[in-house]
Image: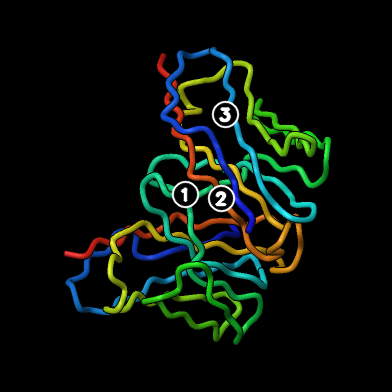
Amino acid sequence: GDSVTQMEGPVTLSEEAFLTINCTYTATGYPSLFWYVQYPGEGLQLLLKATKADDKGSNKGFEATYRKETTSFHLEKGSVQVSDSAVYFCALSGGGSNYKLTFGKGTLLTVNP
Amino acid sequence: DGGITQSPKYLFRKEGQNVTLSCEQNLNHDAMYWYRQDPGQGLRLIYYSQIVNDFQKGDIAEGYSVSREKKESFPLTVTSAQKNPTAFYLCASSSSGRALNNEQFFGPGTRLTVL
């Protein structure tokens, strides 16, 4: 079945540092890929998405590129802020299960001033 | 403003009691979903509904039940048969349950604690 593996946290960075959170996937067919963010005590919000190979999703300074050859969708940001502190989830839809999202376990990011 | 509401935000239940979590959306979405979130486990799908009066089991449906009598409402009942119900429950919706790149919109969640 479909699966998503993302780097385990927690990740702790200083403000203005470079961020990478790795995400790889296993899926049949051609899934769409997503990054969601969850701030403390809240639900999830879509951060960015990509629907086909070599697409780059971007939002709020975050970027991720759909790499079919390496089955990866790594999240990057050039300069993090304290307000970026949250849990980040990589997810896929499609592949073997068109209707549902398959999530990674989440990565907690803490950014210190 | 369009969105998804869940109530209550915090819920306490005694062992052996059933409890119902509310989820309402005014986005005119056809599909709705219930997830359970446990620390370090990501999100797991409990039930989903692609259209009114129809729903299917997700990956961890045992001990839960749902109904979808109205397009905007998808309540989840946690029954006494659920062995470990303490968790954070998230409701989501999407415009369609069949689109490959369909974005799901999430509610703020309900934290259920069994005493």
> Circle 1 sits on which residue?
B42
Q: Residues within 10 Å of mark 2 (few under 14, many from 20)?
A: many
Q: Quadrant of the N terminus of chain A?
A: bottom right
Q: Is A31 displayed left or right of B74 in the figure?
A: right
Q: Label 2: state its secondary structure.
A: strand
The image position of residue B85, as x and y in percent, is: 30, 66
In the rendered image, which residue does mark 2 sit on? A103
Q: CA distance from mark 2 to mark 3?
A: 14 Å
Q: Measured from the top left, where is residue B43 in percent x and y?
A: 48, 54
Tell me how far mark 2 sits from mark 1, CA to CA.
6 Å
Marks 2,1: beta carbons within 8 A: yes
- Residue beneath disc 3: A21
Q: CA distance from mark 1 to mark 3?
A: 15 Å
Q: State the image quarter where residue B12 is shown.
A: bottom left
Q: Residue at x 51, y 64 (%)?
A: B45
B89 sits left or right of A98 in the view: left
Image position of A33 with respect to B89: above or below: above
Q: Which residue appears at 45% of the width and 73% of the height?
A: B61
